[in-house]
Each structure stands twice: as C-alpha cells, then as structure tokens.
Image (cartoon, rainbow, N blue to C red):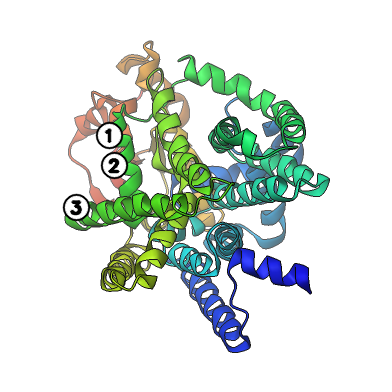
Amino acid sequence: MLARKLWLQRIALPTDSMAVRLHYGALTVICAVGAWLRLTALNRQSLWFDEIDVVVRAQQPLTIVFRTFVREGENGPLYNLLLALWVRLAGVSEIAVRFPSAVVGVLTIPLLYVLARSMGGSSAGLYAAGLLAISPYHIWYSQEAKMYALLIFLAVASTLALSQALAQNTRYWWVAYVVVTSLMFYTHVVSVLVFAAHALYGLLSFTRWPGRLRPWSIAALALTLPYLPIALWAMRVVGGEVTTWQPDVSLWQALRISAVKFAVNRADSQLETRAALLYTVLACLGILAFARRRSGSRTWLLLLLWSSVPVVGLWLVSLRQSVFSDRYASTALPALLILVAAALVLLVRSHRLWPAGAVALFLVVSFAWVPVRDVNRASSAEKEDWRSAWADVAARAEKGDGFIVHPGYLITTRDYFVQREPRLAQFRAATIPTFRVGWLDEDLMVHMLATQLQGLQRVWLIQSPDRVPAEDPHGMLEAWLRSTGPPLYEHEFNGVRVSLYRLPPLPP
C-alpha cells in the first residue's frame, strides 16, 4: 500500500475516486477521438508513389523481402517485412495497406500518455496524449502505408524503456531498451539520431544515475551490432556515393520546416507561421517548467535533446550530402508535444497566467483543426492521384494503344493498379532510363521505345510533372511525342498528367 501511494505521488495521479474516473474518462475520449481521426477515411486519398512502391515490393516472395535486411539502400526492412506478411492476409487495397499504420498511430497515443505522465505528471500525460490525438502531422503519417507511424511509436517506446531502466535499474527494462531500440533501427536508418539523443543525455547526466553506467554501456554496445549493416550504407550516403533527392537547407530552414510540420503539417502561410511560433514558445516554456522542478533526472535535458537532435543531426549530415526531410526527423515530434503539454499545464494551473493558458490551449486546438478539416479529412486529392489517373486511362485506352510511364521508376504504379484495373494488362508499357546517366540521347531513346512499342498507333504518356524535370530536364521525351502534333487528349490530376499522342514513326 505504501509503495502504491509513493508511486501515485511520483506521477501526480489523482487519488480521489471521482477524479480518477474523470481522468481516465478524459483519456478514453482522447484515444477515441484519435482513433476516429486515424482509422476512418483511409481510402479517401489515392496511394501516392512511395506507398505504391512499398506495397508492390511487399508482394514479392518473402525470400526477397527478407534480403532487405542486408541489402544496401533499404530504409525500413522491418516495416517491409511486416507489410509483406500483412498484405498476404488483408490484400492491397488502400484501407488494407494503411490500416497497420493507423493502428500503430492510435496505440502511440496511450503510450505517449504513459511516458509524459511518468515525466511530468498525470495532467501532462493527458495534454500530451490530446495534442498527439489531434496532431495533423501524426494523423497524416498514421494514414500512410509507410514506416513513419511505426518509427514514432518505437521512438516513444525506446525513450520510455530508457527512462524506466534508469529509474529502476532492472535487467528487464535494460533488455527492453535494447530490443525496442534495435527494432527502431531496422524501421528507419535515421532512428539512430534518437539513440544519439539518449547517448548525449547519458554523457551529460550519468553522475546523477549511480550504478547505471555499466548496464547502459552494455546496452550501447549491444545496440551497435544490429545497426552495423545499416550504418555501412548510411556511411555511403553521407560520403556522397548515393544520390539523394532532397534539396539543400540551412539550419534555420531545417528548424522552421520542422516547427511548421510538427505544428500543423500544411496550411496557409500565415497559419503555419503563427502555429510554429506558438509551439516554439510553448516548447521553450515547457523546458523551463521541467527545469524548475529541480529533479535529479534532468528530464528537461532529455526532452531538449530528443526534440532537437533528430532535426539538427539531419542538418549536420546534410552539410556533406543533402538528406534533410521533415519526416526523417519525425521522431522528435513526441518530445515537442510533451514540452508543449508541460507548458500548457503550467499556464492553466497558474493563478495569474491561467487566462494565457486558456488562450494558448484554444489556439493549439484551433490551429490543429484547420489542417485536419482541410487536408486530413479533405475530399479533394491531397496526395498524388494515381488512382484516378490509371482509372481514366483504363476507361479510354483502345486496341493498338500503349503506355509510357515517365520517369521510368514510376512503372510500379502501373504494376499496382493493374490489379484493380485488369484491363490495363492488355496494353504494352514502356519506360526509358533517366537522362542523368549521361549516355542517353534522343536517338537511343527512340530505339529503346521502338523495342517496346513497335506496331502500335497511339501511346499514353503517364507522367509526374514534379519528377520529370529531375530525370528529363530538357523534356526530350514529350518533345519527341509532340513531333506528330498536340495531344489527342490530356488531363491533369493531382501530381499526375495523362496525355494521349499519335506514336511517331519508330525505326525497325
């Protein structure tokens, strides 16, 4: 009984029976809202290319999927395997392939509650869970057939395991930390930055954790083994041996992009600026709220490092090879939300500052609702609309037609949608390499197309206008197609353009 009382005091959980019921009732409502926002409307948006590519590869034989654990260039081999097993049971519809991410996204809400409660008390736990439940950014990636929802879940679980291992110093929690962090490594290569934040926290505060240096050192050594295969490829990327698509960013741009994305994901520029500023101010106040507790654990330092190292670390790597993307830094989101939650609790409970706290809480909810309504729950296409594009082609294509998918790597979109539109299978599809290889010219391009499309009268060009400039900077393919005249038909979908041309003469 005494131990339970001390534990309740440590996490500041209300002991009054009515207060406890209200507390967990509020948590239930928060989780229910979060579940509704993530589990519904999973098929409202078409799968975009990255999702399609992952799904098509997940349909390969399991022996090939298992090789992704040791093959260079694989960011998420664990997710690939889990999805491969799942699609064999559930199929490859939008709902089916996005459902695992949605479930993991929902489970992250109570998990973050547990972590935030252990760090800042029951109210901080509720606020953090509520912020995550309505987070437009987290909702977006919880409804995407990619690894980022799982990555965020494992980042929270890893940090929770570490905090419990430090607090209790038991073998169970140290083993849990190694296992969960290893799973995180194999979910995405950039998750090592979460471990880097943990390691920096350990270096800066190990004197406050007597008796923990040895088990922590053993855990760190154990974590190097599962990361080695991934690290070898990561070193090639940093060394510039692997081409990346991300643009160069300054530190200020990296911080601003992350602040905007984590706050509202996408909205009009004024709302983005205001929301990012509000979250930044509240996060700084949250650091002060944790620091003023003067606890031996220095929770504020852990949260500061966790919220900043994934962003700053990516920027530092980008100084040599541009790799920065906000979704690669998404593991920092939970730490930011815990800091914002702590600030809101501090303001709302203050006798003098509670009006400011009420306004801040209202603004946070209002800022989140706008993109949730206009983007996450939108009926219009917000992602690349490959579904409508291929359905349009399937309905209009005639005997003697063929397809050219441009850039060529987008051919996987045809491989996916031919399962939904079986009529597409009767038409030949052609691709060409990227012009970035240096050796491809118009004559060779025409010769390659001749081997794939000989004997056809018309050709459908299905292309991504956003991607073509990087692969065909002079528009050589479309210029050649237009040599017989303007398109017979053309329609632009979100992120995809469909055009029908008379096929120019091809060499024998």
Dot 3 crowding, Cα within 10 Å, few <14, some 14–19, many 20+: few
Between 465 and 417, the one lying in front of the other is 465
Question: Alpha-carbon distance for marks 2 and 1?
Answer: 6 Å
Q: Residue furthest right?
A: 171
Find residue 269 and name its label: 3
* Proximity of marks 2 and 1: CB atoms separated by less than 8 Å: yes
Quick one: label 2 or label 3, which is nearer the N terminus? 2
Residue 439 image position (x, y, % from top left) = 38, 10
Depth check, mark 2 against mark 3: the one in front is 2
Q: Position of residue 192 (x, y in %)?
A: 58, 33
Depth check: 11 or 230 in front?
A: 11
Q: Which comes before the other along the chain, label 3 or label 1?
A: 1
Query: On residue 256, which mark appears?
Result: 2
Residue 496, labelled with which disc?
Answer: none
> Which of the two residues, 407 or 54, is positioned nearer the viewer here?
54
Residue at the farthest bottom position: 18
Q: Out of 283 and 371, give the one closest to the viewer.
A: 283
Q: Which quadrant is the N terminus positioned in?
A: bottom right
Residue 442 shows in the view: yes
Is 318 left, or right, of 10 in this rendering?
A: left
Q: Locate residue 289: give its quadrant.
A: bottom left
Q: Of the numbered discs in the image, which one, if any, rests on residue 252?
A: 1
Dividing the picture into quadrants, the one containing residue 213 is: top right
Q: CA distance from mark 2 to mark 3?
A: 12 Å
